[in-house]
Image: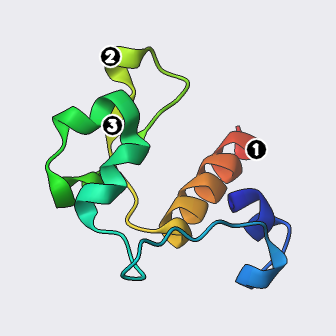
Amino acid sequence: MLAYIIGDKKFLNEIPHLIIENENGHVTDKEILVFFGIHSKKLKDSDWRKYVINWQAPKEKQLCKRMQRNIGELLDSINLFNNNKNNN
């Protein structure tokens, strides 16, 4: 999604996306855990919001604390990193 934002896409209909629903229209915190795969056992329902998966890390180190609260903060941190890298 970040690549699309950097590419100046601003609206959801401009990017490929997937909306996940159950018969009630939304998924519960417990249902979201399936997306954490083998790491889901380490999480309790709403705890998933505090973690991300680093797929580049070894399996035992893939579950990481979330550092940014939303996509905007993540984009800002990447831009800050790139600006610092270019200035050195």
Q: Residue at x 14, y 49 (%)?
A: 44
The x and y percentages for residue 4 are 79, 65
Q: CA distance from mark 3 to mark 1?
A: 27 Å
Q: The N terminus appears in which quarter of the rendering?
A: bottom right
Q: Nearer the viewer, mark 1 or mark 2?
A: 2
Q: Secondary structure at mark 1?
A: helix
Q: Residue at x 69, y 40 (%)?
A: 85
Disc marking residue 60: 2
Q: Is residue 24 above or below residue 6?
A: below
**Which residue position is annotated with label 3?**
64
The x and y percentages for residue 86 are 76, 44
Q: Is residue 70 visible?
A: yes
Q: Residue at x 47, y 72 (%)?
A: 21
Q: CA distance from mark 3 to mark 2?
A: 10 Å
Q: How is the image coloured?
A: rainbow
Identified by mark 1, the residue type is Asn
Identified by mark 3, the residue type is Cys
Graded by Cα atoms within 10 Å as few (under 14), some (14 to 19) or many (20 or more), the crowding at tag 1 reads: few
Identified by mark 2, the residue type is Glu
Disc marking residue 86: 1
Q: Nearer the viewer, mark 3 or mark 2?
A: 2
